[in-house]
Image (cartoon, rainbow, N blue to C red):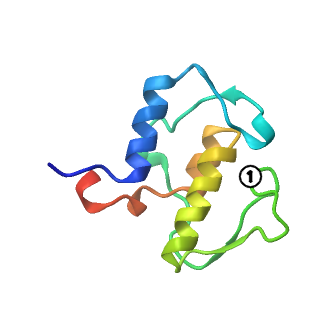
Amino acid sequence: MRQACWICSANSKASAAAPSTRAGGRFGIDHDGFVADNLNELTGPTSGIVTLPHHICWSASPTRNLDNASTVISMYQTVLHEASTVEDLNTWLDRRRHCDQCR
């Protein structure tokens, strides 16, 4: 049996928990959990250099190179953790980044 990728696993866990409060926001701030309504709506960038908005990435270096796999994972973790709306998820995540067995 194949194991789902970390994005699908996180999406499934969040779906099961929604609409309960999700803990662990920046500095321990709680906020309502949410997930994308449809993975096909995740149409974010897939390559090149991107600059995340300040409300998602508070670091002094919000620029990410999506041609580097480890940078993509770090960016996705940041977006999943700090996004404040479903629109943030749709804007910065892309369904094509899922592993082949999850499609």
Q: Give residue 75's position: percent from left, percent from top.
A: 61, 62
Q: What amino acid type should be assigned to the residue bearing mark 1?
A: Ile
The residue under label 1 is 56
The number of numbered discs placed on residues in the rendered structure image is 1
Q: Nearer the viewer, residue 44 or 33?
A: 33
Q: Residue at x 67, y 45 (%)?
A: 83
22 left or right, relative to 53:
left
70 left or right, relative to 96:
right
Q: Give residue 7's position: percent from left, percent from top.
A: 43, 50
Give the answer, above or below, for where 30 lies relative to 94: above
Q: Give residue 61's position: percent from left, percent from top.
A: 80, 71
- Residue reaching furthest to the right: 60
Q: Residue at x 55, y 60 (%)?
A: 44
Camera sees residue 90: yes
User: Within 10 Å of the Cα at label 1, are there few (<14), some (14-19), or many (20+) other Cα atoms?
Assistant: some
Q: Residue at x 53, y 79 (%)?
A: 68
